[in-house]
Image (cartoon, rainbow, N blue to C red):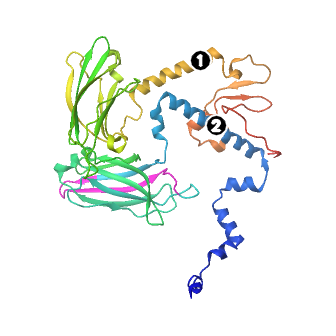
Amino acid sequence: MGNRASEPAVGQRSPDDDAKSPELIEGMARVMTTAKERRTANRNVYTREEQEEEEEEYNYTESAVILTQLFKKMDPAVMKSIGDVMGELKVSIKYKSDQSLLLVKVVGARDLSPKDLRGKAANAFVQVDLVPDPAGTGVKHTNVVRKSLNPTFNEIFAFPVEAGRLPETKLRLTVWNHDSLGGGDFMGERIVELRDVEPNQVLTNWYPLQEETDLSISGTLEISMAYKLPQLLCVTVHRASGLVCWDGSKLPHPFVRVMVPGISMVEQTDVKRGTLDPEWEQTYEFPVPQEEFDYRYVVLNVCDKSRDGVSMGEAHIDVCNFDPEEGYTGSFPLADMRNSDRVRTKWAQRALLQEFKEAMYAHSAYQFPKFLFHKHKGHKVPKLHLRDRDPRRAGAGLSRRCLYHWRQQDTCGRVFLGTRRPKKRTTVLPG
């Protein structure tokens, strides 16, 4: 009886049958193998066009890695744009004042990040809700559009909202990938402030997707700023109030990190244990000349020591309007600033130009790369151009073509930005 219960039912295949079926295994492997990998595995013969295409792809990858590392050193904030979240969401919003009704039309999305095993498609749907939601409307969902990175939804949702509450209400749009197992993969989010929505007018935009924003963060931070000649900006952290508490059974242990981007100093207050209204009264000094006030700002990040320094909210304070003679004292609301519009800081924008100037000076001083600076003879013609000669790549992005700018053309071939050339194939068929 026990052996009989372990046997598969009639019409079902057992795991042993699958293991003994080479056709089934070969079919599964074929599905999970890309076309390029199958071509490489099946034959070692390439036409000249295929070889040139592979060489360009190889050198593009090598060059992209080099440039990414260079930009990361110049401005680490650049790396925030690199990740799984990508794409845009098109949404139309209208507020009907006579009915106190907010209408949200989710039109579609484009250039989403792939989520399937082959990295080519996704089963996307959009989740729509209001924060806060005084009417208790709840979360609404679009239908799932399968196997597409540019889905079209064209679905309308209605939310009852009083006109007086509209400026303080946020529309949250979250894109998910539908999982056949019942779960979902996060693909991006967008928070839309409804204070800019005019009554009875349609607002339509493409919204770039961002990382998830924590809207539960609350509280305020009180600080003051003063200035000491010749160039010391003094920041005093007084107190915080109404901080968020994620664990109802345990109060946080807050402290504040204080920094001025572009200055290699990060200060930290004492840790106040078990409180939502801590007081510090601590002052920190940063060397900031007055001529740099236009592009400097102060970052104050409240963190929880009991949760390994997890952020409880940030405040960014511009110094451009700061009066050194009068000083400043005020309270600032705390918020999740990970998706702030200040992805690339004012300091980084100014410093980037200086980095390029120094890089060009270094190239000329060390005469590198050699093929640009040595005396040319014969048919070697170094050329700098922005157009891609190959008509098949006419639609390629400018950033990709810029990696192929520096080409040395001679009778032997071309020299790319890559650190080494790809391996040559044994057989090359004439094009």
| Residue 390 can be seen in this image | no
Report whether residue 405 is seen: yes
The quadrant of the image that shows the N terminus is bottom right
The residue at which mark 2 appears reads as 62
In this rendered view, identify the residue nearer to me: 168 or 400: 168
Do the numbered discs 1 and 2 sit on residues whose CB atoms are within 8 Å? no
Magenta span: 94-115
Q: Which residue is mark 1?
A: 362
In the rendered structure, find residue 57 and report the number of the disc placed on it: none
- Is 194 situated above or below 134? above
SS class, disc 1: helix
SS label for mark 2: helix
Q: Quadrant of the C terminus?
A: top right
Q: Quadrant of residue 400?
A: top right
Q: Position of residue 341 (x, y in %)?
A: 36, 37
Q: Residue at x 71, y 40 (%)?
A: 55
